[in-house]
Image: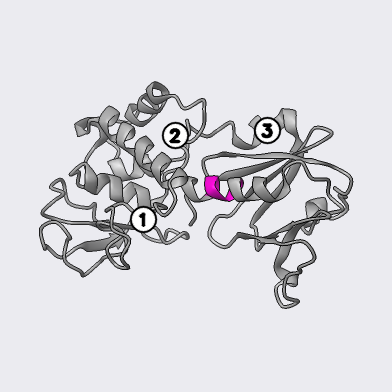
Amino acid sequence: MPEGDTVYALARRLDTALRGRTLTHGRLRVPAHATADLAGRTVLGHDTHGKHLLTRLSDGLTLHTHLKMSGSWTISAAGRWLPRTVMPDVRVALRTDGPAAYGVDLPLVDLLPTRDEALAVGHLGPDPLRADWDLDDAVRRVAADPGRPVVAALLDQRCVAGFGNLWANELCYLRGLGPWTPVADVDVVALLQLGARALRHSATTPGAMQVTTGVRRKGEQHWVAGRAGRPCLRCGTTVRVVAEVPGDPQRRRTWWCPSCQPGPPRPQA
């Protein structure tokens, strides 16, 4: 699943292509908005809150989308079209007299008044990539449930918006925390300060997207995420993995190094 940094970078690419341009064609291929016609509206810009993308249009409209597990956006140059085989999966088509953008297999597509954006994203916690990032509020939200495993708190978008499974696992490793360490035993301030710096670096530094080790070579970009059964890059211990929640439809997994991340064992299913 894309995380806050990938959606932030996507918003910047969409801004480069569409910001300030008037739509010559704007259709939403979802039942709730099948009759909506966005042609003639100007794209004012793109904003993000966590993993949510907000495309603001003239006349006070916002297009709210979420990639979840399956979605993606494709930007095409002026005069270029997507392959016909892809078009049946397009859920959002935004064309201008220059570049065009297509939202493919988007599981969430909504159109709402810009003044009502809080109805779509108001439940989310602070986002380290936003100008209104509030560390104190994020710490308060994470610490509100002292007995909760730290990895679960990091994944809860109501606590902090933008950390997905990769970042939750990598941050636990970088702070030497077993994923199931109770929040009460964690220096939450230090954890979130590190997470905010890492997410900003990933989102804004060319070539740094989700490279947590500082090494871009394949297989060495992450400390533990995706490295089950391989030696820890720091100590050589075999990295382990378990399903985060039995039956989790999003198939989240937890990776950790038993030597570098001491702490309580995983709960038994």
- Determine the residue located farthest toward the bottom in the rendered image: 85
For the point 42% across and 39% down, the residue is: 200
Note whether residue 269 is visible: no
- Kindly indicate whether the residue at mark 2 contacts the one at mark 1 (C-beta within 8 angstroms): no
Q: Relative to 32, does residue 154 appear above or below in the rendering?
A: above
Q: Please, what is the three-letter code of the amino acid marked with disc 2?
A: Pro
Residue 48 to residue 92: above or below? above
Residue pictured at 20% horizontal, 69% vertical: 230
- Element type at marker 2? loop
Q: Name the amino acid, label 3.
A: Glu
Write down the region rendered in magenta. Answer: 7-11
Residue 257 in the image: above or below residue 4: below
Residue that mark 1 sits on = 245
Give the secondary structure at mark 3.
helix
Of 184 and 23, the residue lying toward us: 23
* Image x and y of residue 254, in percent: 30, 56
Looking at the image, residue 243 sits to the left or right of residue 111; the answer is left
Residue where numbered disc 3 is placed: 117
Callout 1 amino acid: Val
Residue behind mark 2: 128
8 part of magenta stretch: yes
Q: Mark 3 or mark 2, which is nearer to you?
A: 2
Ranked by sequence position, the earlier of labels 1 and 3 is 3
Tag 2 or tag 3, which sits nearer the N-term? 3
Q: Where is residue 106 in the image (x, y as percent from the top left)?
A: 65, 58
Mark 2 closeness class: few <14, some 14–19, many ≥20 residues within 10 Å:
many
Mark nearer the N terminus (1 vs 2): 2
User: Which label belongs to residue 99?
Assistant: none
Q: Which of marks 1 and 2 is in front?
A: 2
